[in-house]
Image (cartoon, grey):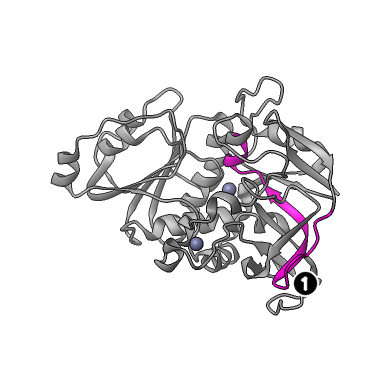
Amino acid sequence: MKALVLNENQGLELRDIPKPKICRDNEALIRVKATGICGTDIHILMGEYSAKTGIPLGHESSGVVEEIGAKVTNVKPGERVILDPTYFCGICFYCQNDRPNYCGEKSNTETGVSHGGTYAEYHVVDSNFLHHLPDEMSFETATLAEPLACVINALRQTRIKPESRVLVVGTGPMGLLFALATKSMGCEVTVGDISNYRIKQAKLLFQKVQDYRETKLLSLNPKKSFDLVIDTSGRALEELIEVVDRGGDILVIGLDYSYEAKINPSYLTDNGIRIVGSIDSNKTFYAAIKMLQQVKDFEKIVTHTFPIDEYKMAFQTLGLDFRSLQRGEILGNKVVICPE
Ligand SMILES: [Zn+2]
Ligand SMILES: [Zn+2]
């Protein structure tokens, strides 16, 4: 079968690899229909995030059940499904303490990072990590369920209320997911970015869109007028402390390991400000699928679909040049790769 494999030089390569087989009674073989490109994939290819070589990448996916193991009862062959790539063991300290997203087994079981991923025609999974894909939802929209499940998990750790004034920094796929999720909860939402394309696209969905290319975030928001600020860029924390109101939360959700911030803890204490970090989903897939069904605007986050053979074009749309490994101009939002 065709698959996009991470080679020994940390590059992505289209290879013909053996079709995976069901080895345990609880597993299901899935014919993958769509996988969304995640920021993590780009970080891996740019050498900023480590992943196992020799395996297919990809983890935000949907497909059709092809075959099931003897003990599988929750899905049948032919059924459309969404895959939860965040495997957990259920018995380690973290799993037993309601934190399965930090499962002790995670280092060797992360789909498309340390364990074979879904940029492939077929994929074998533990059937407990499959969710029914609603009939009216496309395979492409369904790839948003995983990142949206992470968004909902993050929001649940904040003090968000329907009346919250929210600022989302970054209008890439994660930023738009946060912005649409909080808007659907009733919040007043402002978004902002530095990419021309993404600013334009955000304007199709939101009225309050800020442009940080020429004007700084701080000068556009001189008052402390937000109850929740969400940083999907990973490098705006210092500025965000200046714009969050008393009793507000800062959600740090972007990954930029080179960024460091100077913080005055007494200021946080005096003003009751919380900084919240969050990663992965935590029993939030059901909520994510429900929200995708209810709020049709989510579909607009997926801007491009490419067949697997055109994967270079797919990554280039997100500004990743395969030759120089530099980030260039971004010309898409969520880009999806389909094996056929
Ligand atoms: Zn992802
Ligand atoms: Zn565990």
x and y percent of residue 299 in the render?
63, 54
- Horizontal side of 193 relative to 28 (left or right) equals left
Q: At 60% across and 25% down in the image, what residue appears?
A: 327
Q: Secondary structure at mark 1?
A: strand
The residue indicated by pointer 1 is 68
x and y percent of residue 126 in the render?
67, 66
- Horizontal side of 192 relative to 290 (left or right) equals left
- Horizontal side of 272 relative to 146 (left or right) equals left
Which amino acid, mark 1? Ile
Tell me if residue 336 can be seen.
yes
| Residue 157 part of the magenta-drawn span | no
Quarter of the view holding residue 139: bottom right
Q: At 25% across and 36% down in the image, what residue appears?
A: 242
Q: At 81% across and 38% down in the image, what residue appears?
A: 14
Quarter of the view holding residue 53: top right
x and y percent of residue 26 in the render?
69, 72
| Residue 25 part of the magenta-drawn span | yes
Q: At 53% across and 56% down in the image, what residue appears?
A: 105
Query: In this picture, which residue range is highlighted in magenta?
Result: 19-42
Name the one closer to the observer, 16 or 156: 16
x and y percent of residue 291 in the render?
54, 64
Tell me if residue 137 can be seen.
no
Residue 288 to residue 235: above or below: below
Name the one closer to the observer, 204 or 293: 293
Q: For disc 1, does the CB lie below 8 Å from ligand 2? A: no
- Horizontal side of 327 relative to 11 (left or right) equals left
Residue 224 to residue 132: above or below: above
Quarter of the view holding residue 324: top right
Residue 39 to residue 31: above or below: above
